[in-house]
Image (cartoon, rainbow, N blue to C red):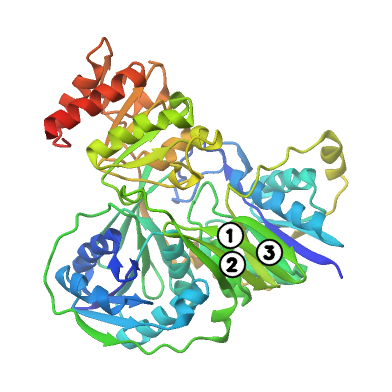
Amino acid sequence: MSLRIVVCVKYVPDATGDRHFADDLTVDRDDVDGLLSELDEYAVEQALQIADEADDAEITVLTVGPEDAKDALRKALSMGADKAVHVEDDDLHGTDVMGSSLVLAKAIEKTGYDLVVCGMASTDGTMGVLPALLSERLGVPQVTLLSEVSVEAGVVKGRRDGDAASEALEAALPAVVSVTDQSGEARYPSFKGIMAAKKKPVESWDLEDLEIEAGEVGLEGAWTKVDSATERPARSAGTIVKDEGEGGRQLAEFLAGQKFI
Amino acid sequence: MAEVLVYVDHVDGAVRKPTLELLTLARRVGEPVAVALGAGAEATAAVLAEHGAVKVLTADAPEFADYLVVPKVDALQAAHEQVSPAAVLVPSSAEGKEIAARLALRLGSGLITDATDLEPGDDGPVATQSVFAAAYTTKSRISRGTPVITVKPNSAAVEPAPAAGATESLSVTFGEKSTGTKVTARTPRESTGRPELTEAAIVVSGGRGVNGAENFSVIEALADSLGAAVGASRAAVDAGWYPHANQVGQTGKSVSPQLYIASGISGAIQHRAGMQTSKTIVAVNKDAEAPIFELVDYGVVGDLFDVVPQLTEEVNTRKG
């Protein structure tokens, strides 16, 4: 029986670019280049490794976002995912994490799945709660923040390194997994992979396909409201000294002045 | 005054500092009712009362330790039904955020994570967040349901405020989904004797410039002189010089201490994302052009192997 893996990925504004807010206090996606969230590359990698170990597996990569978000899907396909689903709808503009989890959950159910794999967080919102929300919505176990993951005989196992302890976890499939940047370096797409990705199927769904009302998502449907976004004032230039033998003592003097010593 | 639920992060009854900070913030928006779960829950009551909890709801059951996250959500939902609070506040740990998210979804409530401040507002609590590697500060509120908000460590000073803190036992019915993810083994992290990275008031970090695992002792010595936690940049962690648990940055931990000392760290955006909200920033780096110097309150251009040991010696002498 084929193992159906769905990997959720996000197309995010490049963190090395100048990210800012649009007038409606949503993230401005026009002024800065986007890319597949770095932390989602680890999810794609682990999905590929799990698929390699399975007798038969199919990986669907899923994203919700504007037209450009297809770039994130292409990257995942070129790494080796089999097919892609792109959920795109003008009414999705301004959707918060609650709405995003609804859209993803509906799309995952429509695709069919045994295992959902996510990154630990997006690199733009950095909330890290989407995998838990998907687990709650889908009614299947969450096996999250794993630095090691494997699937065998319908059971997913993993290691979760927390602040206080490292935990060994296991759950029966179907399940939602998220992996950390410690799970293993993501592979680079090969030239062959990039060429093959161009021929792989990318389905496009809108809200109607997922039987979601426009009012459940978007800015109107958001359960949180951003009232203001203020650019942080540039830090006033600090004192910079060159060490000419007294740098450590000068620094100690500064720290003492600030009452840290 | 309305009651506010505060989820208690504790280890066998020892309450972690972010929870005490949360009680300070909770008092601005209502009367804190603490919820402590698992082994040692009742032992938390005294310290929670000292810091403003009018009531402490406790529950213990094997489910809290044996299964991941969901039993705690069931308990918090039970507490929500019992108290009908004006807000639910949870410390922003990885687990805290997952608990808060699932609870919010069940309650049909909006969720704000990683707040750095909290004030009362006309339409419920207003949360401050720092986003895009601290390039922006946002103010947000919840527009639907009971506000569920997670708050980052070091967002408020711990202020004692004695309150009744009467312990009541909380009755929890675990849902059938609560036992879905089994914890089959648990290995406590070995204590270094240093403060927890995300909670520490001072963090001393080393990066590529430390140039080797053995040289991290220079960073550790400074940290110990200041009672600080040790952090590391991704470059240092990827090189295997320091454990991943200490990584500061976008793919590691986000810290917001009173003082952050970066040694041999150039200050790539990924690192800055994890430390830019630190109150005072100090850097030591050989390269005068390193981007970290754009952030600093005080910077020393020099060899960390000269500057850091001299600083450590000076700190130890002054503490004398």
Let me know if marks 3 and 1 both belong to one chain.
yes
**How far from the left and from the top, in percent, is residue B297?**
26, 28
A194 and B45: which is toward the camera: B45
The residue positioned 43% from the left and 41% from the top of the image is B248
Against B105, is B97 above or below?
A: above
CA–CA distance in space, label 3 to label 1: 17 Å
The residue positioned 49% from the left and 51% from the top of the image is A125
The answer to whether residue A258 of the structure is visible from this angle is yes
Q: Which residue is mark 2?
A: A169
Q: Secondary structure at mark 1?
A: strand
Q: Amino acid at mark 1?
A: Arg
Dividing the picture into quadrants, the one containing residue A143 is bottom right
| Residue A116 tag number | 3
A255 and B269: which is toward the camera: A255
| Mark 3 or 1, nearer chain start | 3
User: Can you say which quadrant of the picture contains the N terminus of chain B?
Assistant: bottom left
Chain ID, mark 2 = A
The answer to whether residue B267 of the structure is visible from this angle is no
Chain ID, mark 3 = A
Q: Amino acid at mark 2?
A: Leu
Let me know if marks 1 and 2 both belong to one chain.
yes
B126 and A117: which is toward the camera: A117
CA–CA distance in space, label 3 to label 2: 16 Å
CA–CA distance in space, label 1 to label 2: 6 Å
Contact between marks 1 and 2 (CB within 8 A): the answer is: yes
Contact between marks 3 and 2 (CB within 8 A): the answer is: no
Q: Count residues near mark 3 (Cα–Cα under 10 Å), then give few for <14, some for 14-19, many for 20+.
A: many
**How far from the left and from the top, in percent, is residue B207?**
44, 30
User: Can you say which quadrant of the picture contains the C terminus of chain B?
Assistant: top left
The mark lying in front, picked from 3 and 2, is 2
Q: Amino acid at mark 3?
A: Val
**How far from the left and from the top, in percent, is residue A89?**
66, 59
